[in-house]
Image (spheres, helix red, strand yellow):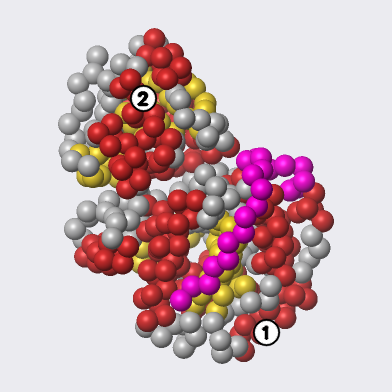
Amino acid sequence: MSIWTIRFPKTLAAFVSLTAILLAACVAPAQPAQMQSDAAAAEGEGPIYIGVSGPLTGPNARYGEQWKNGFDLALEEINGAGGINGRPLEYIFEDTQSDPKQSVVVAQKFVADPRIIVELGDFSSGASMAASQIYQRGGLVQFGFTNSHPDFTNAGGDYTWSNSVTQDQASPALAEYAVTDLGLTRLAVLYLNTDWGKTTFDLFAVRAEELGAEIVSSAAYLAEEKDFRSALTSARDANPNGIILISYQADGALIAQQLQQVGLDLPVVGASSMQSPDFLELGGEAAEGVYIRGQFLPTDPRPEIKNVVDRYIAKYNETPDYFAIHAYDTMNLIAQAIELGGPTREGIHSALPQLKDVPSVIYGKASFDPETRRVKDPQFVNLQVQGGEFVLWDGVKPDVQ
């Protein structure tokens, strides 16, 4: 059974603010608390607690919900098999709305709580990086499993880890799918006006141009926008032969629908963040045919994948998306770190560099580069929406001029 707490913060700016930086700078090293935490955790007989910082309300709440589904499926298996040396593994989920100011507050709370031996999150790199120094000073590993910013694991230090691909890896891969595999050469790009969106666009554009494509139109948009027709009309007038969406699932679905309204009947290629049943449901017919550069195929017939997907569908009555399965993988990885290093903060810190070939639905087997504190050799998969579901791309290029 998981423990999760919901906070309802006010809506705040989406970027790292001066307030967040000052709060982080004011946090004193928590060495006595850490030593007390490690001693109590090592000798305890009750649950082993993990802290989770992420969105359960606000515009990114769906991602937090998918995390929770993946965590709970993993814990059902871990605790059903006796937990870790007879102790159940549980988590405390603090809602930050993925806001940097709230992630700082949660970081202070987790560092001061001797029960918490490792932290997972936050959802966005910006929210995580605002809190990284707090976790570093407190001797508490911050495991940002969806943090793709290239500088994330440098933001804190040796207590900052991730099994997420970086934008340095994912953005060029998206360009290679669009340009090399699909043959699109004149690209119109719409991207979220966030740190993630802008960084992804910049890296995508560099690689696309290296491959011989031209960015004929680009437009940034805010997460709360609903009407994209002006940007799409400008894109249409630039005469592209492909549309690139650096979007999340809900806004990506809206853009796909509005493409038809402005007469843009072109191949659409989306980032892996759009690979979700929500995109299919919200996009409806407009989602049909969209290409996605993903990392996970729910219909993969390999037993190690099919068994997990089948259990997820049986439990939640829906197909898992990448974020749910990545959360499932992450909980299992952290459980192995606890078994290897012991149920303490320092035990987690010492175990992560030693983990090798951890079974993973997303990666097959996951190992870390101890220098970058990132997972080695990420994998990508070319997908397309056909018949209302994500399937492997059949290799047939779209007919474009």
Label 2 Cα crowd, 10 Å radius (few <14 / some 14-19 / many 20+): some
- The answer, for residue 345, to whether it is visible in the render is yes
Provide the residue designation for mark 1. 39
Residue depicted at x 41% and y 39%: 250
49 lies left or right of 191: right
Q: Is residue 114 above or below residue 5?
A: below
Instruction: Name the kind of residue labelled 1 in the image.
Output: Ala
Where does the image place residue 221, in percent across and percent down from the top left? 52, 28
Provide the residue designation for mark 2. 258
Q: Is residue 352 above or below residue 395?
A: below
Residue depicted at x 49% and y 22%: 219
| SS under mark 2 | helix
Instruction: Name the kind of residue labelled 2 in the image.
Output: Gln
Rendered-image quadrant of the C terminus: top left
401 lies left or right of 336: left
399 lies left or right of 165: left
Q: Is residue 82 above or below residue 361?
A: below
- The answer, for residue 372, to whether it is visible in the render is no
Q: Is residue 185 above or below residue 340?
A: above
Q: Main secondary structure of the magenta part?
A: loop
Dot in front, 1 or 2: 2
- Tag 2 or tag 1, which sits nearer the N-term? 1
Residue extent of the magenta highlight: 1-21
Assess whether residue 343 is covered by the magenta stretch.
no
In the foreground, 392 or 313? 313
Where does the image place residue 276, in percent across and percent down from the top left? 35, 47
Determine the image quadrant of residue 251: top left
